[in-house]
Image: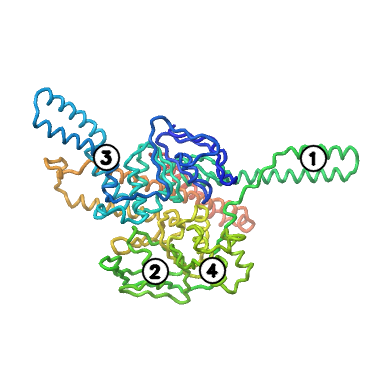
């Protein structure tokens, strides 16, 4: 065990935030801490790191273990270049290099015992240097920088010139290079693009140490976490497995708690009815029995009613009127900013009811495409044409559609003057703005609060074409799920940009990948996109292998004649990951087929006993044959499912 957290209590202004929070982290374990905004996640991390004192409780680290912590807004500063800043982490190796160089120079000028002494020192230093991976530290630094999304030409940039997000990425890189026994990360994916998040996932999965992560990125948590610690209503509950296992377990616990509450409430009402009936007899014996039952009722430990899942926030998106079948046509779209060309000759179209996600690395121009469609930016070339009866609702990640000086109430009433005071308050209350909150000015709101207000305006717009730029930014997991449910039920057309892979997986019918200034179309969700990308990489690798038939399998004398061990390891790892993803997708497909056939068999059983069919011999025979075929197919599918489930 590397960390033990026992009975932590913390209050602010006498309001409890954490009560009796306990859990432990084992060596090499990957754990996630989840909870709604304000649940106390960051407070708990600060208590663990000793930055904040707990009111009660104890945090204990295993002896001789190192801990690294990256807070949500941590950044680096100074005049170092990006490369120099990460190189500082390897100062011990740099010092050894300098000592080795000094000894090398000294050995050239001495002899005898002094030379022997220097040679022994040099041998010890060389061993220590090799143990510290000194011969590979430069490539390690470069690998981390590239993994976190820095191009080689950026390595020489001064840290002082970087944006806040870039500085946070540099701080994350330094922490990863330190390789402590326990890494604690607070929202590490906030400033990373999809490629960098995927790299970080692989890095942490293979990390020889323990990891604690606070994150709202559910896809990331699904890939990384083997334990989930939920903070809810000041208490902590520990679940084994990843995020999906936690969500299923949480729902089971909630259902069980709700059933127990309802059962107890029924029993209480029953006892109260019996007591009332006994008293109505108005006899001494019956009154005594009533009093006895009342005493028993008073001793019952009454269960609290479990809170309904996402019961507080309500989001319903529905078009006021239907658009034509052709919603959007983009033809030959190009855009540059000075010498930087973002994209050239992009063409795509959207049909009514499609939900399409645009993905790609940071800086490729995804948000620019949305702004051009919304006429907030002019294109250099190309045309944008909207279809018949198309009404756009726009969600801007920077919330420029909001007016900072207005109150929340004014923001809604000015844009929707037909609403009365009660309707405005009810709308805001549906997004958790109640009481005096409605008179706050927008400039004082947090990012999450602005996001909720933008969603409120989007709901009122009744648009039939939604254009959303990073709609899940700053939203907690609960709010994301509410938005996902609303979009899944939405009958209009949606075009959005997002880095939230879980969100994309649930809501996208189609994906447009913006890469190398052009768009590639994928007819499916994010898992489908990954599967097809993997197939493309495999085809490229095969083509490259086939194009070099005469290449010797034995390495020659030159270092470039054979691939390096690191490259071979990387390739093997990629193949392993591809095989794992394929197995998981095959398993999902197999389960879906089994579920469909079992459901059909249940329907057949119902039909065979129905009055219309049970007297129709021909129909009964048809249904019986169909069921027999289904049973044969199910037997085969069960075997396949078992093989896939047991596969390593």
Q: Earlier in the sequence, mark 4 or mark 2?
A: 2
Q: Which residue is mark 1?
A: 294
Which residue occupies the extreme top position in the image? Answer: 113
Q: Cβ–Cβ below 8 Å for labels 4 and 3?
A: no
x and y percentages locating residue 195 in the rendered image? 34, 53
Residue, x 12% and y 32% (percent of image)? 106
Q: Earlier in the sequence, mark 1 or mark 4?
A: 1
Q: Earlier in the sequence, mark 1 or mark 3?
A: 3
Disc sitting over residue 411 in the figure: 4
Which of the two discs, 1 and 4, sits closer to the camera? Answer: 4
Q: Which residue is mark 2?
A: 371
Which of the two discs, 2 and 1, sits closer to the camera? Answer: 2
Q: Cβ–Cβ below 8 Å for labels 1 and 4?
A: no
Q: Compared with residue 478, is residue 376 higher up or lower down, i.e. above or below? A: below
Disc sitting over residue 91 in the figure: 3
The CA span between labels 1 and 3 is 75 Å
Callout 1: SS? helix
Callout 3: SS? helix
Which of the two discs, 4 and 2, sits closer to the camera? Answer: 4
Which of the two discs, 4 and 3, sits closer to the camera? Answer: 3
């Amino acid at each position: 065990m590397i960390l033990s957290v026992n009975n932590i209590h913390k209050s602010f202004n006498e309001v409890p935030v954490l009560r009796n929070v306990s859990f432990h982290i084992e060596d090499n374990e990957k754990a996630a801490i989840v909870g709604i905004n304000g649940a106390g996640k960051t407070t708990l991390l600060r208590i663990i790191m000793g930055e904040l004192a707990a009111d009660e409780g104890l945090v204990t680290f295993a002896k001789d273990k190192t801990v690294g912590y990256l807070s949500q807004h941590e950044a680096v500063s100074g005049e170092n270049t990006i490369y120099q800043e990460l190189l500082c982490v390897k100062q011990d190796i740099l010092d050894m290099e300098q000592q080795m160089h000094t000894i090398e120079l000294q050995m050239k000028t001495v002899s005898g015992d002094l030379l022997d002494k220097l040679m022994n020192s040099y041998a010890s230093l060389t061993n220590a240097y090799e143990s510290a991976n000194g011969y590979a530290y430069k490539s390690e630094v470069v690998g981390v920088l590239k993994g976190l999304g820095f191009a080689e030409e950026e390595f020489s940039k001064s840290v002082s010139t970087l944006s806040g997000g870039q500085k946070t990425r540099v701080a994350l890189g330094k922490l990863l290079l330190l390789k402590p026994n326990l890494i604690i990360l607070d929202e590490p994916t906030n400033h990373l693009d999809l490629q960098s998040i995927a790299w970080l996932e692989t890095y942490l999965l293979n990390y020889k140490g323990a990891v604690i992560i606070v994150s709202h990125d559910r896809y990331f948590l699904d890939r990384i976490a083997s334990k989930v610690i939920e903070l809810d209503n000041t208490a902590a509950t520990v679940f084994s497995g990843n995020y999906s296992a936690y969500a299923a377990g949480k729902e089971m616990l909630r259902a069980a708690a709700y059933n127990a509450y309802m059962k107890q409430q029924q029993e209480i009402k029953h006892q109260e009815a019996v007591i009332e009936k006994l008293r109505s007899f108005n006899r001494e014996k019956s009154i005594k029995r009533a009093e006895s039952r009342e005493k028993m009722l008073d001793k019952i430990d009454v269960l609290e009613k479990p809170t309904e899942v996402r019961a507080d926030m309500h989001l319903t998106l529905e078009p006021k009127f239907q658009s034509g079948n052709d919603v959007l046509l983009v033809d030959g779209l190009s855009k540059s900013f000075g010498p930087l060309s973002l994209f050239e000759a992009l063409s795509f179209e959207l049909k009514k009811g499609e939900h399409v996600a645009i993905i790609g690395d940071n800086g490729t121009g995804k948000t620019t495409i949305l702004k051009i469609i919304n006429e907030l930016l002019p294109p250099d070339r190309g045309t944008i044409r909207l279809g018949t009866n198309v009404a756009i609702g726009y969600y801007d990640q920077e919330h420029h559609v909001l007016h900072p000086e207005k109150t929340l109430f004014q923001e809604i009433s000015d844009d929707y003057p037909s609403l009365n005071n009660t309707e405005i308050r009810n709308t805001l209350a549906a997004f958790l703005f109640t009481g005096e909150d409605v008179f706050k000015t927008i400039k004082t709101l947090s990012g999450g609060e602005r996001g909720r207000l933008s969603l409120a305006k989007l709901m009122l717009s009744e648009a039939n074409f939604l254009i959303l730029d990073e709609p899940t930014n700053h939203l907690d997991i609960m709010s994301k799920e509410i938005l996902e449910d609303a979009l899944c039920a939405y009958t209009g057309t949606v075009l959005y940009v997002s880095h939230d892979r879980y969100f994309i997986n649930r809501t996208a019918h189609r994906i447009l990948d913006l890469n190398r200034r052009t768009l590639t179309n994928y007819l499916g969700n994010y898992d489908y996109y990954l599967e097809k990308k993997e197939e493309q990489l495999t085809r490229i690798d095969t083509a490259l292998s086939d194009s070099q038939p005469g290449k010797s399998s034995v390495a020659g004398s030159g270092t470039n004649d054979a691939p390096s061990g690191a490259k071979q390891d990387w390739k093997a790892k990629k193949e392993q990951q591809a095989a794992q993803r394929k197995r998981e997708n095959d398993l999902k497909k197999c389960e879906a087929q089994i579920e469909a056939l079992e459901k059909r068999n249940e329907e057949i059983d119902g039909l065979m006993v129905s009055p219309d069919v049970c007297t129709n011999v021909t129909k009964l025979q048809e249904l019986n044959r169909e069921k027999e075929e289904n049973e044969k197919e199910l037997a085969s599918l069960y075997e396949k499912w078992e093989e896939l489930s047991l596969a390593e």
